[in-house]
């Protein structure tokens, strides 16, 4: 087995501050990249001293989250710009983070730096992106949740809108930035020229958290209403348990589980949207059953009935959860606490261990020698980091299709393989009403542009034979079935690699390929429930899922793919990649785990508040809309108070609220005063006034109303494509500019649209054979019941 460290030839200069840049470079350091973190000695990364639980650290001790995010990196304290320029000239990529209105970085603007060193790639991460009319608009991840439409769908009307804790938007931008950095370095192999990549957290959050609501607005129209999945996180006898029945069969099984089969047969409860109107009745029916049973007893029954379910984890419980213990998911950090491991496994390579994080300025400002290359890496065969590669895409729903969508947008030729008997289930979700039901699913449309579509019945020998032909000419196969499915088709990884020894097989089951839960059904909601994400993403008394982890988990699979491609270029060997969706989710929730392990404090939901930003909240306005704001510093509070003091409210003139600690104690009183102020003004008026004063604030936008957005228009975030059945629609690209690809040029395929082009044109099937395959139902363009 090859030693870990497949990015060991990569030199990364990390000038970022905060989570996004640190997480991006962590994903590179995990595979051996030489990451040199450079900080100003008098102004170090604030994460070094920041704890979410509020524990005061001893002098000189770095925070556990900082040590998790920066394990395996080296640290140099900034002293000399000339020396930094030398380092940049020898680096492969520079990663920086910017706040709106920030001056150029330590080395100047990324574009100027790239002009000075043409082979250097730069990745800049900022809330809105470095260009466009909102580039200098103050923002936090919290206010971007409102501006993206994410908050508009969450919660119950009587309890108010609710955001999600855990800084998930920052992690999503970091994951995209890691993929962007790897893509930029791979693209530059073929041209000798680096790339200047500008990553927008806002755009990352639109992609990862809003389930393509802009497409929904175009194809179905209407407005999003506050929504709770039924069932979702429900009370058991000994804690919380999460459910996620997504199909009609799973809903029927759930009703059987709670001993109310008549509910499944009632037309009033056929769909999730219809069930919202009967929320109280259904909760009574569910809770009267769940409260009488333990979590373990319920999970055992759910596994027998194939109902997606999981315990609800938190920082206190996760390290003792049987599945995670059996799989060795948690490992020791050298600094004395527990953390999640690298969230993917490469079958031909050792999983990287955890290295110490550096103290400030612990290392000389110099690069390690590059290891000798065992072979010259192949440059991409065209524009795009993955140009020239073919992907056999057997995925369905969101996580798998999103991963292959990103591959397609990076230049790969992605061939989606479905079955007419069982098409991708997302085809039937949020469907456009005037087209065949399997062709108008908004989420399917969002996750599948830039692909070609085929159908093969894999339970038929003829279908498997055609799949073999496809695989023999492919570079990757991607699937996100339950572990047993490939084996049921006779498509074990050993068989696939025998057909094509250079093949990279990407497997993305919810829970992994082994362990006590491996055979359980699971969707993203279950993964968020089990990983701790839901624990901090809801009301203080009600965990809620956030629907971030499908696409963010997919980005981790992309990082693993880049590592596997590096291994194949060195050795000629393919291999199997295992990316259990729950393990990237555990990394997103790592703060809960490391802080409980390090400090003995369990992090719980703060609702719409944040101990670092006070006040923070959602406030009703005169136009019956809502505004969100987050005050990050004493100076920002002073600016807000000065601007609002003329309204006559004594709170805004109270000198006893000048400090964060004082404001935290009186948050209720401040909220009441803010509510009185906003109730007399429109949401846009409040947001515009605060933004002009340098305070993050955004009107809470309904997810269907994000467009037209001046920032997205200016940055050309969408591409208009003509689909054969749904017509002309906007489709989003990737959340950055500066790489060869990123915007789709091909609409998502109709079912079996490219059967002839692929099977006859590329796999050598004769016209007679093709007609016979259609007649036998091995291939087709519509479900057999249509």
Image (cartoon, grey):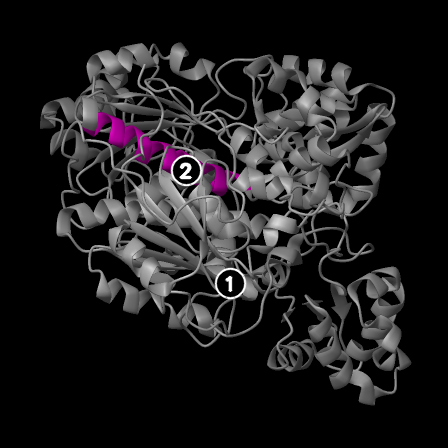
Tell whether 673 sits left or right of 312: right
On screen, 631 above or below 414?
below
- Which range of residues does the magenta coloring cover? 549-569
On screen, 260 above or below 158?
above
- Residue 416 position, x and y percent, is 31, 34
Q: Is residue 440 visible?
A: no
Q: Secondary structure at mark 1?
A: loop
Q: Which residue is mark 1?
A: 127
Q: Is residue 229 visible?
A: yes
644 or 366, which lies in front? 366
- Residue 623 position, x and y percent, is 73, 77
On screen, 721 above or below 381?
below
Label 1 environment density (alpha carbons within 10 Å; few <14, some 14–19, many ≥20): many
Q: Quadrant of the N terminus?
A: top left
Q: Magenta stretch containing residue 235, yes or no?
A: no
- Residue 594 position, x and y percent, is 65, 34
On screen, 549 above or below 775?
below
Q: Which residue is mark 2?
A: 29
249 or 465, which lies in front? 465
Please tell me whether mark 1 or mark 2 is closer to you in this view: 2
Tell whether 185 sits left or right of 693: left
Q: Magenta stretch containing residue 561, yes or no?
A: yes
- Residue 305 position, x and y percent, is 64, 16
Residue at 68% across, 30% down: 243
Q: Quadrant of the C terminus?
A: top left
């Amino acid at each position: 087995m090859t030693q870990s460290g497949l990015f060991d030839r990569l030199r990364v200069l990390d000038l970022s501050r905060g989570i996004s840049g640190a997480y991006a470079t962590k994903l590179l350091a995990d595979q051996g990249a030489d990451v040199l973190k450079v900080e100003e000695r008098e102004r170090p990364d604030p994460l070094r001293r920041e704890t979410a639980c509020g524990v005061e650290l001893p002098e000189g001790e770095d925070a556990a989250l900082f040590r998790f995010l920066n394990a395996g990196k080296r640290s140099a304290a900034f002293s000399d710009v000339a020396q930094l320029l030398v380092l940049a000239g020898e680096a492969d990529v520079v990663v920086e983070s910017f706040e709106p209105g920030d001056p150029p970085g330590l080395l100047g603007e990324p574009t100027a730096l790239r002009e000075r060193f043409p082979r250097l790639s730069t990745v800049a991460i900022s809330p809105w992106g470095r260009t466009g009319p909102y580039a200098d608009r103050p923002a936090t991840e919290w206010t971007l949740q409102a501006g993206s439409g994410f908050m508009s769908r969450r919660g119950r009307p009587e309890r108010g809108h609710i955001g999600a804790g855990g800084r998930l938007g920052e992690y999503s931008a970091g994951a995209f930035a890691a993929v962007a950095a790897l893509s930029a370095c791979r693209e530059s192999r073929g041209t000798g020229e680096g790339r200047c990549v500008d990553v927008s957290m806002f755009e990352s959050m639109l992609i990862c958290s809003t389930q393509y609501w802009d497409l929904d607005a175009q194809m179905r129209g209407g407005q999003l209403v506050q929504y709770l999945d039924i069932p979702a996180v429900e009370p058991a006898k000994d804690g919380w348990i999460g459910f996620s029945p997504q199909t009609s069969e799973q809903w029927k099984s759930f009703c059987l589980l709670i001993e109310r089969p008549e509910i499944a047969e009632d037309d009033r409860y056929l769909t999730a949207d219809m069930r919202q109107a009967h929320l109280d009745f259904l909760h009574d029916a569910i809770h009267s059953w769940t409260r009488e049973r333990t979590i373990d007893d319920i999970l055992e029954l759910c596994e027998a009935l194939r109902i997606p379910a999981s315990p609800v984890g938190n920082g206190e419980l996760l390290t003792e959860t049987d599945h995670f213990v059996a799989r060795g998911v948690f490992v020791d950090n050298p600094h004395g606490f527990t953390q999640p491991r690298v969230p993917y496994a490469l079958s031909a390579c050792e999983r990287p261990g955890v290295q110490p994080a550096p103290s400030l300025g612990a290392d000389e400002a110099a690069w390690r020698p590059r290891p000798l290359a065992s072979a010259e890496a192949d440059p991409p065969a065209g524009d795009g980091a993955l140009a020239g590669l073919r992907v056999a895409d057997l995925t369905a729903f969101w996580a798998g299709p999103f991963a292959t969508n990103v591959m397609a947008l990076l230049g790969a030729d992605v061939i989606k393989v479905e079955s007419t008997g069982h098409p991708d289930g997302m085809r039937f979700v949020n469907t456009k009403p005037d087209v065949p039901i399997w062709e108008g699913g908004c989420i399917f449309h969002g996750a599948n542009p830039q692909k070609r579509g085929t159908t093969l019945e894999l339970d038929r020998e003829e279908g498997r034979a055609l799949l073999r032909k496809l695989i023999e000419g492919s570079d990757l196969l991607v699937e996100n079935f339950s572990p047993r499915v490939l084996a049921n088709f006779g498509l074990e990884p050993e068989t696939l690699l025998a057909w094509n020894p250079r093949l990279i097989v990407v497997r993305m089951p919810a829970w992994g390929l082994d362990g006590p839960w491996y055979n359980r059904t699971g969707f993203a909601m279950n993964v968020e429930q089990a990983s701790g994400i839901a624990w901090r993403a809801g009301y203080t008394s009600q965990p809620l899922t956030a629907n971030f982890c499908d696409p963010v988990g997919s980005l981790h699979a992309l990082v693993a793919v880049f590592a596997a491609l590096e291994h194949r270029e060195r050795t000629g060997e393919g291999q199997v990649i295992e990316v259990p969706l729950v393990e990237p989710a555990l990394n997103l929730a790592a703060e809960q785990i490391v802080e409980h392990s390090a400090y003995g404090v369990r992090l719980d939901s703060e609702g719409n508040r944040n101990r670092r930003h006070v006040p923070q909240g959602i406030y009703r306005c005169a136009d019956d809309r809502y505004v969100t704001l987050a005050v990050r510093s004493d100076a920002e509070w002073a600016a807000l108070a000065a601007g609002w003091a003329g309204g006559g409210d004594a709170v805004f003139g109270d000198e006893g609220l000048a400090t964060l600690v004082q404001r935290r104690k009186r948050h209720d009183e401040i909220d009441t005063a803010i509510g009185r102020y906003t109730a007399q003004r429109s949401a846009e008026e409040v947001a515009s006034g605060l933004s002009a004063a340098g305070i993050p604030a955004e009107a809470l936008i309904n997810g269907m109303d994000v467009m037209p957005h001046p920032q997205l228009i200016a940055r050309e975030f969408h591409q208009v494509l003509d689909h054969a059945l749904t017509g002309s629609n906007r489709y989003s690209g990737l959340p950055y500019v500066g790489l060869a690809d990123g915007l789709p040029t091909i609409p998502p395929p109709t079912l079996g649209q490219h059967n002839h082009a692929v099977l006859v044109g590329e796999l050598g099937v004769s016209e007679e054979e093709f007609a016979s395959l259609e007649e036998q139902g091995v291939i087709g363009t519509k479900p057999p019941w249509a």
